[in-house]
Amino acid sequence: MKPDFPVPNHVGIIMDGNGRWARRGGWVRLKGHEAGVKTVRDITTAAAEWGIPHLTLYAFSSENWGRPKKEVTGLMKFLKRFLVEERPLLLKNGIKLQGLGELDRLPTDVLVVLQETESLTADGTKMVLRLALSYGGKDELLHAAKSMARQVKEGACEIQDLTVEMLRSSLYDASMPNVDLVIRTAGEQRLSGFLLWQASYAEFYFSQSLWPEFTQTDFLHALKDYASRVRRFGGVLENDPASEIPSS
């Protein structure tokens, strides 16, 4: 099932629909999150096998802290277990795991396990798997703005010297490449604050499948759809049909 077409360099996925999947089965919401962990495993494995260098999963937004305490506690429990149980698979597949977001807001025990997994997988060269945790795109941009303001205040540069590249280098992960393809499941069609800077020129693919039902075949369809897109990045390509002026 490996793609016979070029794949994106960086795929970002907004994993939506766990709660709806659970409600449909008459279960509590946490049952959906638990089921979604298997999908994370399947999609991550496929991405590594199919030669996608970067995969970023929107696992927990900064707004998610406002959910019921019982659900947040359960999510942190699942995250901690995932970080431990997936280590052998990450190491086997050469996957480097990194957290992305306001990680110091995570419970101490979860943060420790995350840092241990990051350290253990640091030499992975096949793919970088980023988990957006306690993440918000506006928060990231504010973080970058404060960092640049601090540089100006300390005399490291002048306001007029600030550049787009300096802002990029002040984001949570300066080494992260721009996102080529954003996939969102469960039929929703919005970014919800996901990688606002990095996804500014991304292609989008919206799947009707709820995240626990999103399969490697669904993933393949999204990649195939992406491969058919023409990416102009605001410019005009040579022999681009879209740039032709109709004759009168």
Image: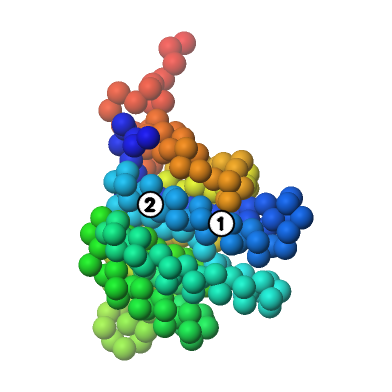
182, 47: nearer the viewer:
47
Q: Secondary structure at mark 1?
A: helix
95 relative position to 226: left or right: left
Q: Secondary structure at mark 2?
A: helix
- Residue found 65% across the figure and 61% down from its top: 31
Quadrant containing the N terminus is top left
> Does residue 15 appear in this view?
yes
Looking at the image, the residue that sits furthest to the bottom is 154
Few, some or many residues within 10 Å of mark 2 (<14, 14–19, 20+): some
Q: Position of residue 154 (x, y in %)?
A: 31, 88
Locate residue 124: give its quadrant: bottom left
Q: Position of residue 38 (x, y in %)?
A: 51, 55
In the picture shown, does residue 135 fall above or below 200?
below
Identify the amino acid type marked 1: Gly
C-alpha span from label 2 to label 1 = 14 Å
Locate residue 91: give its quadrant: bottom left
Q: Position of residue 227 (x, y in %)?
A: 37, 34
- Residue found 57% across the figure and 50% down from its top: 211
Looking at the image, the residue that sits furthest to the top is 248
- Residue found 49% across the figure and 71% down from its top: 81
Q: Position of residue 148 (x, y in %)?
A: 36, 77
10 relative position to 219: left or right: left
- Residue found 41% across the figure and 33% down from its top: 224
In the picture shown, does residue 8 fall above or below 39?
above
Q: Which residue is labeled 1 in the image? A: 36
Mark identifier at residue 125:
none
19 relative position to 179: left or right: right
111, 37: nearer the viewer:
37
Identify the amino acid type marked 2: Thr
Q: How is the image coloured?
A: rainbow
Q: Which residue is labeled 2 in the image? A: 45
